[in-house]
Image (tube, grey):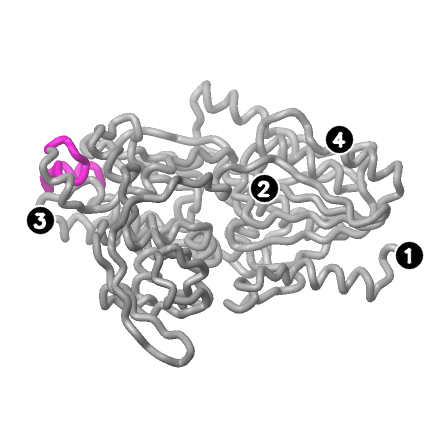
Amino acid sequence: MKHYYFIILLFLSCCHTDNEKNNNSIFVKSFTPQQLKQDIDYVRNSLTKKHPHLYWYISRSKLDYQFDSLKKTINAPLTAPQFRHKLLHILSSIGDGHIALQFDNNKLSTEDMLFFSGSKEYPIQQLTYKIIKNRLYVLKNRSGNNTLSPGAEILSIDNKPSFEIIKDFSDEWVSDGYNQTYKIGRLNLDDFPSRYYFTYGLKENLTFTIKQHNDIKSYVLSVRNRPKPKRNDNWVTTSTSTMPLNDRAAYIKVSQFVNVSDPFSTFFARAKKQGLKCLILDLRDNLGGDYMQMVKLFEHLINKPAFFCNIKVRELDSTQKAIAKSMDYGTKVPILPNRNHFDGKVYVIINGPTFSAAALLAANLQVTSHAILVGEETGGGRNGCIAGVYQASFLPNTKLFFRFGLYQFIVRPQVNQKGRGVMPDIPIVYTIKDYLSTRDLEREWIDNDIKAKGVLKQ
């Protein structure tokens, strides 16, 4: 699974006074209840006809009830962002993390573009946030108010409790099965401010109720001129990076599976030549990407032929069939070990944003190899996901971009924990103090385990 993220949607909000003068703005233009109900029927019918396993995690009766209930509640016009917010609550209950309901960037007006990329930095943008066990903390403070310390807990924003805000965001975020780590993980990838815009609108003043040093105080942050923008490395990723620990152990970070020339062959050829004994494979925050790139890595981590997944698919058109053909390797034809495959000790680091192709890789390594998984439950489903080939269209009235997968990837054997991600063999739990001190608890555990077991001396 390739992901085509429409990043711009994350910076849209439901309302803003600056846009009320622009009748072409998506925040102003509204649609009649009849038009909105037509769009609901379009989504419902498309999923029913094409989705390969619509009722994997939700019963048909429950999903039908939710669609019917939504239609009954729409009695007044809504803007596209307002409508999307309501419909996402239903789509998220399906348990298919690859379903997308986005704005078409090409249809945004100039005013809308300026709305979120203009010269102002709003209060919600002036902090960096960290969610831990449904509690909201300040990770970094760029507001200029130096009395608000990193590590402080945010109890409420504009008198709305933080746990309610987190629930609002989680309820509309699609994820595989019943998994929650992906939703929280994505919010922690600096997505909290953009979700706040989208759900509650931009506000020039916000009151934060903060608990720090056992004291509870309120702080008001106000809009200011935007500082010079910095590159967001959460979205600009490289395929791989490697770092030798010594002559017998190495660390490889795969941020995303990108459809480029094979980055793994040279690395594993050198590893074999040097007699590498230990490999740390870091898949944290890897949202997935190109299927074949991921399979190329898998080839280097198995020592006998293996099927990657079984598949289930419904009707495809000619273009979709051509895309699907590339995924026969591993699903219909066994994957063969690379001649330079690695037979030493493997540690795989995972977390909530380990998703799609990355989560499928982690699941297969847990089943077929000698790997030890360290970290947090993946956001991608352990038993598989629905992706690979997509049905994409625009809703007839609101023109929201709607996409869902047509390939169901099924990891064998299935596990009884239905609807959950890949579970780590060694679970790791962070505190806010750990984040503030930039500790890497997974690496610390692995380094200690390598030393305790004498892996490098074997």
Q: Nearer the viewer, residue 395 or 4?
A: 4
In the image, which is nearer the foreground, mark 4 or mark 3? 4
- The secondary element bearing badge 4 is classed as helix
- As drawn, the label of residue 234 is none
Callout 2: few (<14), some (14-19), or many (20+) C-alpha neighbours within 10 Å? Answer: many
In the image, taking residue 124 as reference, residue 188 lies left or right, namely right
Q: CA distance from mark 2 to mark 4?
A: 17 Å
Residue 75 tag number: 3
The mark that comes first in sequence, 3 or 2, is 3
- Given the image, on which type of amino acid does mark 3 rest? Asn
Name which of mark 4 and mark 3 comes first in the sequence. 3
Residue 364 in sight from this viewpoint? yes
Amino acid type indicated by mark 2: Ser
Vertical comparison of 190 with 326: above or below:
below
The magenta-colored residue range is: 23-40
Is tag 2's residue or tag 4's residue first in the polypeptide sequence?
Answer: 2
Q: Nearer the viewer, residue 207 or 172?
A: 207
Q: Amino acid at mark 4?
A: Ser
Do the numbered discs 1 and 4 sit on residues whose CB atoms are within 8 Å?
Answer: no
Q: Name the residue tied to disc 2.
A: 255
Identity of the residue drawn at 75% across and 51% down: 346
Mark sitting earlier along the chain (2/1): 2
Give the residue pinned by disc 1.
457
Q: Residue furthest right?
A: 458
Q: Is residue 149 magenta?
A: no
